[in-house]
Amino acid sequence: MKPETTLSDVLLTALLTALASGLASSLLSYFFWRRQKKDEINYGIRNAHYVKAQEALMATWSLLGRMTDTENPQSILVWEKAKDKTVTYVLRVAQAQEFMSDLSEVFYKKGYGIFLNQDIKSLLFEYRSILYGLLLSEKSNAEPQFVVKNEEVVERMKKIYEELNKALQEEMNVSVN
């Protein structure tokens, strides 16, 4: 004999089913919400790091204006061509000192050095070392500029500029010609 189903039994079953499905959906919603919040936090951290890294690359890019041998008011090395077509490179002391100051500012004071890859850091500090050596060699010279006699040093400085230019463009995901 089958027991008869009463209205109260049906209502109780419906209520328990509704409570169970409500609880299950609440739990699922909570877990999905927590996962989404964790993903948002991780995205925010990654995005902040990316923005700082791009700022570091742009600040380092600004140093290239001093490193180029194309004459501009900021360039450290400028070239002069004589009538016999020989090229002489002249180092501007004030611009060299400003470069060293700007490099310290970008690298240490602003903290961008931590975001640069090792290749870029090495190139920057190799250039700085060469520059520092040139300035030390002419320390007793009170002139605002002097001729760099060592052609190998000039060529290395130009090569560092080219390598750094390319490395920064690659790092910033900009197409390199």
Image (cartoon, rainbow, N blue to C red):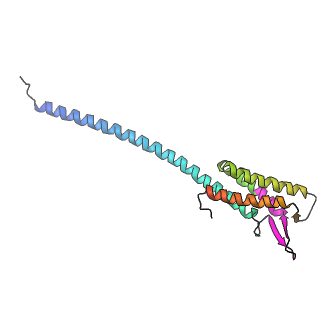
Give the left or right position of residue 33, taking residue 113 as reference: left
From the viewer's side, name the closer residue of 142 and 159.
159
Tell me the quarter of the picture where residue 75 sits. Answer: bottom right
In x, y percent, where is residue 133?
85, 54
Which residue lies most toward the top here?
1
Marker count (numbered): 0
Highlighted range, magenta:
72-101
Q: Does residue 130 sit above or below 5 in this rendering?
A: below
Q: Does residue 22 sit above or below 94 in this rendering?
A: above
In x, y percent, where is residue 158?
76, 61
Q: Is residue 90 visible?
A: yes
Tell me the quarter of the picture where residue 51 sits. Answer: bottom right
Which residue lies most toward the left here?
1
- Residue depicted at 57% across the width and 52% down the height: 50
Q: Quadrant of the C terminus?
A: bottom right
**Magenta span includes 59:** no
From the viewer's side, name the closer residue of 56 and 83.
83
Q: Quadrant of the N terminus?
A: top left
- Residue depicted at 19% across the width and 35% down the height: 14
**Magenta span includes 96:** yes
- Residue depicted at 11% across the width and 33% down the height: 7
Which residue lies most toward the bottom here?
83
Give the left or right position of residue 51, taking residue 114 as reference: left
Tell me the quarter of the picture where residue 148 sits. Answer: bottom right
